[in-house]
Amino acid sequence: MDFTLSPRIESYRARIARFVEEEILPLEADRTAWDAHENIAHDRLGPLRRKAREEGLWCLQLKQETGGQDLGKMGMAVCYEEMNRSIFGPVVFNAAAPDDGNMMLLEKAGTQDQKRRWLDPIVRGDVRSSFAMTEPNPGGGSDPGMMLTTATKTGDSYVIRGRKWYITGAADADHFVVMARTSDDPRRGLTAFLHHKNEPGWHIDRRIPIMGPEEHGGHCELIYEGLELPADRVILGEGMGLKVTQMRLGPARLTHCMRWLGLAKRCTEIARDYAENRHGFGIRLADRESIQIKMGDLAMGIEIGRLLVMKAAWALDQGSFARKEVSMAKIHVANLLHQAADVAIQINGARGYSKDTVLEWIYRYARQARLVDGADEVHQMVLNRHLADEGRAFWTWQSGTA
């Protein structure tokens, strides 16, 4: 594993870093640029997105023929980390969830017609999208096998009925990927469908209030009450929904980690700046051993997270599903982000608890990291299953040919 960055990827990383520093952070500091849900307001977002496209910093995750920059997962790792130095960064570059994962899925699994109709508008930034999988109890959550939403075939069409909730971005989305049960087969029972917001037979029941700040479109509860879709809306084929889910969620979990590392580093940046300038009892905070221990531990944790993410990104670039690597990165980085925000708030004292910095925003946002795309405990069980199956081979290094 060689994590040396190519000159091309380093150029993108440096350009992203400059764009965030000069274009996004000043806007983040202006509270009039925030919307009611504590995200960047749409009227301020549009000009930044146009500028990012003009500078060739758009859709780094996609192939060039799709409209992206074809950086691969390792290139994405370093660039996404730089993007999320700002809480507004990823959406500016069209690299925010859920569009990020939906675009990568449709690029890989969509037919040419599906790409033209459903993917291209997201790539252009004309529409937003959503991925509707999670259901309220007793339906499917981390275990998609529990899914209760059904898609009943009627002639050449499917009729979808059921309920979804905590569907990110749904209120602002035009294009949806929805998962439904088409049979009771444990492996081939689920199917993924595409639909538009204006099609009859479904509605948003509510936008669910949450603890933290929200992505554009919030987290919504959806009711499907007879949405009829033609067969050409099926992704990959009937019964391939579990594979679609694996294709969608594996890389998406890792891109979350890439972005969260950027936020964790931002927390240390704010903490260090305050500690170096705040004096008390005749000494700078930065000169206190207790602060140095906290910051040193945080720096180590971030670097461990970066290595876990990069190893998983490398494995994905090699064609592996990287299930172990992604689960390890997801557990570590999710907890790291919460720790980074907590330590930075503690160092900043009342200032950190206030809205004078973005630390309290990151703290509230960070708590969801241990839940979204699989709770800590689910990923820990995944790792234990691999350990039980592989034994000592769990830790095998990949070796080259002689």
Image (spheres, helix red, strand yellow):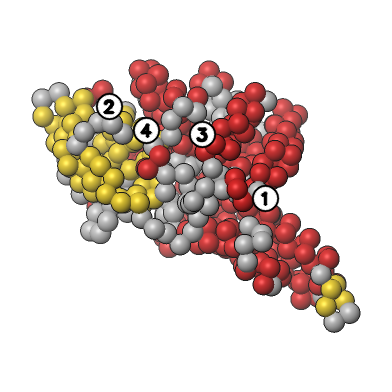
On the rendered structure, is 152 left or right of 242? Answer: left
In the rendered image, which residue does mark 1 sit on?
29
Among the two numbered marks 4 and 2 on one chain, the one whose residue lies closer to the N terminus: 4
In the displayed structure, would residue 266 be above or below residue 316?
Answer: below
User: Please, what secondary structure does the residue beneath circle 3 have?
Assistant: loop
User: Please, what secondary structure does the residue beneath circle 4 have?
Assistant: loop
Among the two numbered marks 4 and 3 on one chain, the one whose residue lies closer to the N terminus: 4
Q: Hey, what amino acid is under mark 1?
A: Ala
Q: Hey, what amino acid is under mark 2?
A: Arg
- Which mark is on residue 174? 4
- Cα–Cα span, label 4 and label 2: 15 Å
Give the residue drawn at x 50%, y 28%.
125
Which numbered mark, 3 or 2, is in the foreground of this view? Answer: 2
> In the rendering, at what x and y percent does residue 302 appear?
67, 56
Q: Hey, what amino acid is under mark 3?
A: Gly
Viewer-nearest residue: 56 or 147:
56
Can residue 194 be seen from the camera position used here?
no
> In the rendering, at what x and y percent does residue 84 appear?
62, 46
- Cα–Cα span, label 2 and label 1: 43 Å
On the rendered structure, is 254 left or right of 385? Answer: right
Which numbered mark, 4 or 2, is in the foreground of this view? Answer: 4
- Cα–Cα span, label 3 and label 1: 41 Å
Residue lying farthest left? Answer: 155
- Which mark is on residue 319? 3
Give the residue drawn at x 23%, y 46%.
223
> Circle 4: is it few (<14), some (14-19), or many (20+) Cα within 10 Å?
some
> In the rendering, at what x and y percent does residue 281 appear?
85, 82
